[in-house]
Image (cartoon, helix red, strand yellow):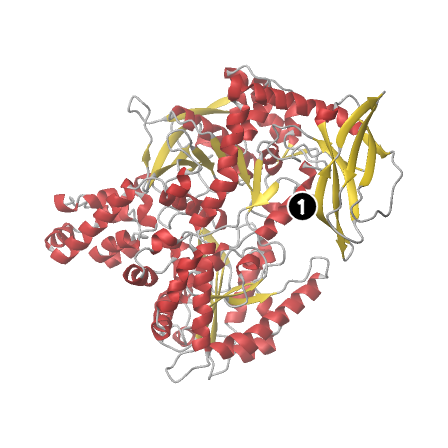
């Protein structure tokens, strides 16, 4: 007979003196303020853990007597009052002076769109790096006081919960969220009713409820289609993050992009800076164009120019699979009627997502690039890679000169710094939270005595090993492992005070991240992990996408290695990787390993989280580490270029990694002085923190966005919107002229080409340009002067030719070049369109060379 288990909660009443706990539970400041979370933890540790660190659920389930006792506990009440005071002070702070130089909170508003937000394990609407980056972006925005709102989707099922069975197979379990458990509430319209907006999907109206998540000074608005007014199918659109096929994906992106714009309008918000974080939300460009076409009676091209002027687009991955591409049939199915409101035909519409190499598919990254004027990758290397990947958008422009730029990612320090570091900083360096942008300030870490620094690092490791041990035992118990095997697996984790070097590798299991690179030489790995005088443990954690069979095979491989007699207890595979486990690992391991296939690591923020906690990075010089590594704060593995054979690259880099571990990392860690710790290791660990805290925190990242992207977007949008948007119309009309005429543009030299001049003389250059109906004011002819290094031209100077006269269909341009360099010079001549209203000089993508 099947039993039914019914449930009910016996809910307490908050004592009046603790009423602020409800406010704390419903504001996402708790996701990074450890003092807030500690209040709940202290009330009932076991309940806090069983509730998944969710304060809203916690307050519904805690025993009344525990609240009553806390209200009478003078020590607890003193801590509570301090937390409430800090909470209120935080909310009374206004924008920093650094922000006010660029943005005005009264007139400016940034709208940040992303398909996932990773703020905390208690609000599971994220899968991994993109979401956690978006969460850190929002946290830094509120810390800095930015005028900022965010738009996303509220999923019933976030990313899956992972278990690993006895044979090493990943099992994905989706646990539906109950919205009354989450720190969200319905957004309200001016009449005080729950706010809803409507989008059209395949000619039917889909109703969307707007929820709000208060996050310090800012609000994240989340859209939900699971409403009784919708069909059963439409109710599932926002059901699962990254769930379903391409048809479901395009529906989610219509909801996010088009529905997100409509939600902001219904809220009465008027952003002037729009940030598209990855291409999933790029349909917002179309909706904003539609508004101008319908409401302002603009033509589409002018509307598109105006919309693009205030739009920032960030691309996050050099891996092609990370970019959404829809076939034309889907685009016709979902947009044929919508396009009519744009005032264009389907052919013109589809070109917005086409590239020269793929004119039958609609690429969301392409749509975002065409519909924005400010674009960036997420590290210096990735910016360069992205400029090459997306060079089809600007086909005649050298990739290094096209409009693609970069902002290197950073992590939210208060979220990922261990509480022990925060407590120490609060005692010794009270101004540290206000000094995150000041590199010089962090030399203060040298004031921490080395023995105290080492002791704190060992304390964090012990806590991490204890936590890991509980996870291991839970998995062993579920999988029916014998007691003998459990003892072997927990050889070191069951003794958290052990003097052991712990290496950590935790991230998404994707093949390009090469999690098993260390396994290429098992003889050396066996020697490394089996030296009783220098014990080393290697911990792995991470998820593979449920559809990524090669990624899941990596998990099985690590599982099999972890059970080999020579590796059992020394290679540990953890399941259930989430933000809670990540915080323990990035603060508790000694060494953070990262072995991506160059140049496929866009940024790699897990290493940043480790570095700010004094963990030492040993990583391939890709992504952020190429900028972060200074020779004193860890170890860098020089990557081999992609043109080398994969097998050769993997073997060589595996050898380099083993050399570093065997000959540098392990000996340094175990080189103990008379005081019982490694002086050299402490110096490297301190340098890791000193160099990385100010350079790779999310406030630095946000300030880069503000100065390099948000502020220029604000100014450019304002410029094109003047005089009833006449500049936008003018620029769009000019660009159409350029597109129509450029293919028959050419130029020729008409001077006697000199190969030598005397010092003090000028080099005469004369060019006839054939402009095919354009005027001399429409173009610029430029002379680049420089040298060559190993066959590569390096520009040192640029000078422009001036228009002299027209002769029939030829336009004469001249330059008397004044060299700035002695000896052998090289020079090149090129022509490209020019208009004073361009955001980037090469945004047209047009250029011809002589």
Residue at the far right in the pictured view: 752
Q: Residue at x 71, y 26 (%)?
A: 778
Establish if 299 lies above or below 171.
above
- Locate the C terminus by quadrant: top right
81 left or right, relative to 585? left
Seen at 40% across and 35% down, the residue is: 149
Residue 491 % position (x, y): 41, 76
Q: Is residue 711 left or right of residue 787?
A: left
Instruction: For mark 1, give the secondary structure.
Output: helix
Residue 457 location (% of width, % of height): 38, 69
- Residue found farthest to the top: 297
Using residue 81 as the reference point, say whether residue 170 is left or right of it: right
Task: Identify the residue position indicated by label 1 in the image.
Answer: 400
Res 174 visible: no
Question: Residue 579 is drawn in which quadrant?
Answer: bottom left
Q: Nearer the viewer, residue 105 or 638?
A: 105
Q: Position of residue 757 (x, y in %)?
A: 84, 47
Q: Residue furthest front?
A: 760
- Vertical relation: 785 (above or below) 430: above
Q: Is residue 448 left or right of residue 260?
A: left
């Amino acid at each position: 007979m099947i039993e039914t288990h019914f449930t009910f909660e016996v809910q307490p009443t908050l004592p009046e003196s603790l009423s602020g706990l409800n406010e704390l539970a419903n504001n996402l400041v708790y996701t990074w303020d450890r003092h807030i979370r500690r209040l709940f933890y202290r009330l009932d540790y076991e309940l806090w853990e069983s509730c998944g660190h969710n304060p809203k659920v916690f307050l519904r389930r805690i025993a009344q007597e525990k609240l009553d006792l806390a209200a009478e506990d003078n020590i607890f009440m003193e801590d509570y009052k301090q937390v409430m005071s800090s909470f209120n002070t935080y909310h009374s702070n206004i924008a920093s002076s650094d922000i006010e130089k660029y943005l005005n909170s009264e007139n400016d508003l940034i709208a940040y769109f992303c398909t996932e937000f990773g703020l905390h394990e208690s609000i599971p609407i994220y899968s991994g790096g993109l979401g956690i980056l978006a969460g850190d972006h929002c946290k830094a925005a509120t810390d800095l006081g930015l005028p900022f709102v965010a738009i996303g989707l509220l999923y019933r099922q976030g990313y899956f919960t992972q278990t690993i069975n006895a044979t090493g197979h990943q099992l994905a379990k989706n646990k539906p969220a109950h919205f009354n458990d989450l720190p969200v509430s319905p957004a309200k319209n001016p009449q005080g009713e729950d706010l809803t907006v409507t989008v059209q999907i395949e000619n039917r109206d889909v109703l969307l409820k707007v929820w709000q998540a208060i996050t310090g000074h800012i609000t994240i608005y989340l859209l939900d289609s699971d409403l009784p007014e919708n069909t059963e199918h439409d109710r599932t659109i926002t059901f699962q993050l990254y769930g379903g096929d391409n048809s479901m994906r395009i529906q989610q992106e219509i909801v996010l992009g088009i529905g997100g714009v409509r939600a902001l309008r219904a809220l009465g918000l008027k952003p002037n800076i729009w940030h598209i974080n990855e291409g999933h939300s790029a349909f917002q460009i179309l909706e904003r164009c539609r508004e101008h076409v319908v409401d302002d009676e603009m033509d589409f091209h002018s509307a598109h120019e105006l919309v693009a002027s205030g739009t920032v687009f960030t691309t996050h991955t050099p891996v092609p699979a990370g970019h959404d591409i829809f076939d034309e049939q889907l685009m016709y199915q979902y947009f044929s009627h919508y396009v009519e409101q744009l005032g264009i035909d389907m052919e013109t519409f589809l070109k917005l997502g086409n590239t020269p190499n793929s004119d039958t598919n609609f690429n969301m990254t392409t749509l975002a690039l065409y519909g924005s004027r400010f674009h960036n990758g997420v590290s210096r290397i990735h910016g360069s890679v992205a400029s090459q990947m997306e060079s089809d958008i600007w086909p005649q422009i050298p990739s290094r000169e096209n409009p693609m730029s970069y902002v290197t990612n950073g992590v939210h320090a208060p979220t990922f710094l261990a509480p022990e570091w925060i407590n120490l900083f609060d005692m010794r360096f009270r101004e540290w939270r206000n000094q995150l942008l000041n590199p010089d300030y962090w030399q203060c870490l040298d004031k921490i005595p080395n023995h105290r620094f080492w002791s704190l690092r060992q304390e964090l490791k012990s806590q991490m090993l204890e936590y890991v041990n509980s996870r291991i035992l839970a998995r062993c118990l579920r999988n029916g492992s014998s007691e003998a095997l459990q003892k072997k697996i927990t050889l070191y984790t069951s003794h958290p005070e052990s003097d052991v070097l712990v290496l950590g590798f935790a991230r998404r299991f994707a093949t390009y991240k090469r999690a098993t690179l260390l396994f290429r030489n098992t003889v050396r790995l066996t020697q490394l992990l089996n030296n009783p005088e220098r014990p080393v443990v290697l911990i792995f954690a991470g998820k593979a996408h449920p559809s990524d069979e090669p990624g899941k095979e990596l998990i099985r491989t690590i599982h099999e290695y972890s059970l080999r007699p020579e590796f059992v207890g020394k290679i540990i595979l953890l399941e259930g990787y989430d933000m809670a486990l990540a915080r323990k690992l990035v603060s508790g391991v000694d060494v953070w390993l990262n072995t991506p296939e160059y140049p496929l690591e866009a940024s790699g923020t897990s290493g940043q989280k480790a570095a700010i906690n004094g963990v030492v990075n040993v990583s391939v010089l890709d992504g952020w580490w190429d900028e972060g590594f200074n020779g004193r704060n860890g170890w860098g593995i020089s990557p081999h270029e992609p043109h080398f054979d994969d097998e050769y690259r993997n073997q060589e880099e595996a050898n380099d990694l083993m050399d570093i571990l065997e000959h540098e990392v392990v000996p340094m860690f175990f080189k103990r002085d008379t005081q019982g710790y490694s002086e050299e290791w402490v110096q490297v660990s301190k340098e890791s923190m000193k160099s990385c805290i100010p350079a790779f925190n999310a406030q630095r990242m946000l300030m880069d966005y503000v100065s390099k992207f948000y502020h220029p977007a604000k100014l450019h949008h304002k410029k094109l919107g003047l005089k009833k948007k006449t500049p936008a119309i003018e620029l769009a009309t000019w660009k159409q002229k350029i597109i129509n005429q450029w293919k028959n543009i050419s130029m020729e030299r008409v001077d006697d080409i000199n190969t030598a001049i005397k010092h003090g003389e000028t080099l005469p250059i004369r060019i006839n340009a054939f402009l095919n109906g354009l005027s001399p004011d429409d173009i610029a002819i430029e002379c680049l002067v420089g040298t060559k290094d190993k066959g590569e031209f390096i520009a040192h100077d640029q000078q422009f030719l001036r228009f002299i006269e027209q002769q029939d269909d030829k336009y004469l341009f001249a330059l008397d070049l004044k060299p700035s360099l002695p000896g052998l010079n090289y020079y090149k001549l090129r022509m490209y369109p020019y208009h004073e209203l361009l955001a980037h000089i090469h945004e047209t993508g047009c250029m011809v060379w002589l």
